[in-house]
Image: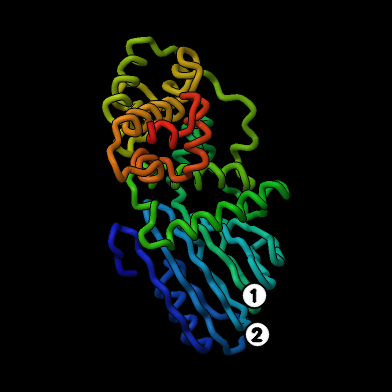
């Protein structure tokens, strides 16, 4: 892929014929794809990809049938089948997907898949990034975090993954993309990783209790608050706040909940909302609510307006006009 302006890497390619399709897939994806069996029809493949900030999203339209085998995937890769029918199998089971189904590839197993004419959206994220999010919320991550490939845990979660896949794909594919904003890139990665843990079966779902990481004093909390206040305009993470305050991420979570009745991320949003409020008050001619909201990491003006009204008793537009 060739880096696009702003950092998002995008590519759009097409192949005609089975041999050209195999070469194309092996040139884009790090896991080797090889033909097996006797089912192999010629046809076409149209593939568009986009990647930024640790998150990738691809849209694939395929008009052919073949059986193939892939090596284990290095990233966690979840698909949403938009149209058609797709059979996926590992060493122990085969799964048949129809339009509307979602599925998470196992990072351990070689996958056998039997494509038909289909359209699908793929969302990719690094396994280490998802494990980092899991560790922050659940403590020590089990060695078998992703023991098997699998479907969403419920119909509602399947719907959630469809919505997320569409949002991530649209966000990364747009040029320019709001994902290129430094305050948004980290939130997008966090959103995808957290959703993957909630949607697809994994070992964290067996954890019913996480022991307290121990007491954190108010001096540590004051350092954390001061760091957030001084760096709210930067793409900081919970790990950054914890490091600056001299404690661990989980301990910091407990301290914020105990003393401030919110999480570090919620406190960061409050600070950014307050900075946006000040900017709206001081804005000159030509300023817009959408531009100011985006500058402080709020991609949805509807979400921004809802929380702004709850905090200040009026809409952002009313503040701007006054």
Residue plotted at (50% across, 31% down) = 307
Quadrant including the C terminus: top left
Verify CB contact (< 8 Å) between mark 2 and mark 1.
Answer: yes
On screen, residue 223 versus residue 264, left or right, reads left
Distance from Cα at disc 2 to Cα at disc 1:
9 Å
Establish if 49 lies above or below 156: below
**Residue sitting nearer the eye, 241 or 279:** 279
Colour theme: rainbow
Q: In the displayed image of the protein, which residue is found farthest to the top?
A: 218
How many marks the image carries: the answer is: 2
Q: Label 2: which residue?
A: 39
Q: In the displayed image of the protein, which residue is found farthest to the front?
A: 322
Establish if 282 lies above or below 154: above
Residue plotted at (37% across, 35% down) = 237
Image spot of residue 286 (x, y percent): 31, 45
Image spot of residue 38 (x, y percent): 64, 86
In the structure shown, which secondary structural element does the residue marked by tag 2 occupy? Answer: strand
Mark 2 crowd level (few <14, some 14–19, many ≥20, 10 Å Cα):
few
Mark 1 crowd level (few <14, some 14–19, many ≥20, 10 Å Cα):
some
* Residue 291 in view of the camera: yes
Quadrant including the N terminus: bottom left
Marker disc for residue 254: none
Q: Label 1: which residue?
A: 114
Locate residue 100: give its quadrant. bottom right
In the structure shown, which secondary structural element does the residue marked by tag 1 occupy? Answer: strand
Image spot of residue 63 (x, y percent): 60, 82
């Amino acid at each position: 892929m060739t880096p696009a302006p702003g950092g998002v890497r995008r590519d759009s390619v097409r192949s005609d014929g089975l041999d050209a399709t195999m070469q194309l897939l092996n040139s884009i994806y790090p896991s080797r794809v090889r033909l097996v069996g006797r089912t192999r029809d010629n046809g076409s493949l149209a593939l568009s990809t986009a990647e930024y900030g640790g998150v990738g999203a691809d849209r694939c339209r395929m008009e052919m049938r073949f059986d193939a085998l892939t090596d284990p995937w290095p990233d966690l890769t979840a698909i949403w089948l938009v149209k058609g029918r797709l059979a996926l199998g590992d060493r122990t089971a085969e799964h048949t997907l129809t339009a509307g189904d979602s599925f998470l590839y196992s990072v351990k197993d070689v996958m056998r898949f039997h494509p038909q004419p289909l359209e699908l959206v793929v969302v990719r994220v690094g396994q280490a990034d998802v494990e980092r999010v899991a560790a922050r919320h659940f403590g020590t991550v089990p060695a078998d975090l992703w023991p098997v490939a699998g479907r969403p845990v419920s119909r509602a979660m399947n719907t959630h993954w469809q919505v997320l896949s569409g949002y991530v794909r649209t966000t990364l594919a747009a040029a320019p993309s709001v994902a290129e904003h430094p305050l948004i890139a980290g939130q997008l990665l966090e959103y995808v990783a957290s959703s993957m843990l909630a949607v697809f079966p994994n070992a964290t779902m067996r954890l019913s209790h996480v022991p307290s990481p121990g007491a954190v004093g108010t001096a540590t909390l004051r350092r954390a608050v001061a760091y957030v206040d001084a760096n709210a305009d930067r793409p900081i993470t919970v790990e950054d706040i914890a490091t600056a305050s001299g404690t661990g991420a989980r301990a910091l979570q407990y301290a914020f909940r105990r003393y401030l009745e919110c999480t570090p991320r919620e406190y960061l949003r409050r600070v950014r909302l307050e900075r946006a409020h000040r900017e709206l008050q001081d804005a000159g001619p030509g300023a817009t609510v959408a531009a100011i909201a985006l500058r402080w990491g709020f991609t949805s003006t509807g979400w921004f307006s809802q929380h702004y009204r709850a905090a200040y008793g009026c809409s952002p537009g009313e503040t701007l006009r006054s």
